[in-house]
Amino acid sequence: MEGGPERGITLERGLVKGQEIHSQNPARLIEKIIRERIFDSLYWKEQCFGLTAATLCDRAVEMTYIGGQYGQQRPTPFLCLAFKMIQLQPEKEIILEYMASEDFKYLRALAAFYIRLTYPAAEVYKLLEPLLADYHKLKLRNMNGFRLIHVDEFADMLLTEERVCDIALPRLPKRIVLEDMEELEPRESALGSELSDLEGDSDNVSDVESNTGVDKDDGEADE
């Protein structure tokens, strides 16, 4: 059969021409039924047409919540923009700029979701684990309405759950497996770092007390 990934596949609406991701057409990272709902949504038709990696950023900073589907299985703007990113496949430098945008938490969440869907496992851990220390609030919308979460919770969901925002995530090996394969360095927890700092402070105090005691004894001996 002629044609490879570079020629794309045109049997289904919305399939992407270009490089495959996880050995499949990138569009298939989103289930077909949800893709169809995205294409039929008003937000997709009015806000996503003609977007580029640069203008998509403008749309993303306008978001006020994340989520998958709501109401009568309508896709959220978050899900529409995530699929648009899959179509555009922005350069890694652009995605990293999105991730560095601490003042635009929904843009950051969108980039994290895209990374989880499309990047190799080791890079997923390297790029998403720093978000476990981000405690900005996020509104999550689903079929039951809105609820409040935090960026670190969303990052943990992406790293540990099979479905997030109504999308089945690619299989992610356990971190320990990647460590054993030497694809990742062992992760030092923030608590472990704090305990080390406290132990260091304790040692410094002991040294000071010890030195002070020596000086005092020396002074008494001189008397």
Image (tube, rainbow, N blue to C red):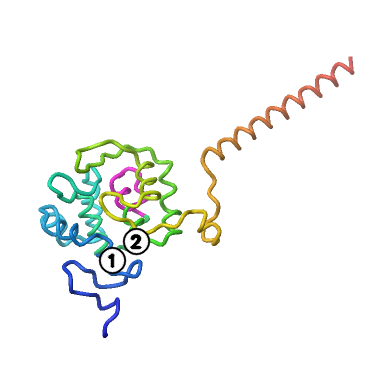
Task: Give the CA separation, mark 1 to mark 2.
Answer: 8 Å
Which one is nearer the viewer's eye here, 32 or 119? 32
Q: Amino acid at mark 2?
A: Thr
Q: What residue is shown at x 53% (from left), y 37% (from top)? A: 191
Q: What residue is shown at x 89% (from left), y 18% (from top)? A: 221
Residue 168 vs 200, above or below: the answer is below
Q: Secondary structure at mark 1?
A: helix
Please tell me the numbered disc located at residue 26: 1
Q: What residue is shown at x 13% (from left), y 52% (from top)? A: 43
Q: Quadrant of residue 205?
A: top right
Residue 25 percent coordinates (x, y): 28, 69
Residue 57 percent coordinates (x, y): 25, 53
Q: Quadrant of residue 169?
A: bottom left
Residue 91 percent coordinates (x, y): 33, 63
Predominant secondary structure, magenta span: helix
- Name the residue at the top extreme: 223
Instruction: Answer left or right for 202 relative to 168.
Output: right
Numbered range of the magenta stretch: 97-112
Q: Are marks 1 and 2 in contact (CB under 8 Å)?
A: yes
Q: Quadrant of residue 24?
A: bottom left
Which quadrant of the rendered structure holds the N terminus?
Answer: bottom left
Please tell me the numbered disc located at residue 49: none
Q: What residue is shown at x 30% (from left), y 62% (from top)? A: 90
Q: Is residue 142 magenta?
A: no
Neighbours of disc 2 within 10 Å: few (<14), some (14-19), many (20+): some
Please tell me the numbered disc located at residue 118: 2
Q: Amino acid at mark 1?
A: Pro
Residue 140 vs 162, above or below: the answer is above
Which one is nearer the viewer's eye here, 176 or 4? 176
Q: Secondary structure at mark 2?
A: helix
Instruction: Answer left or right for 117 relative to 214.
Output: left
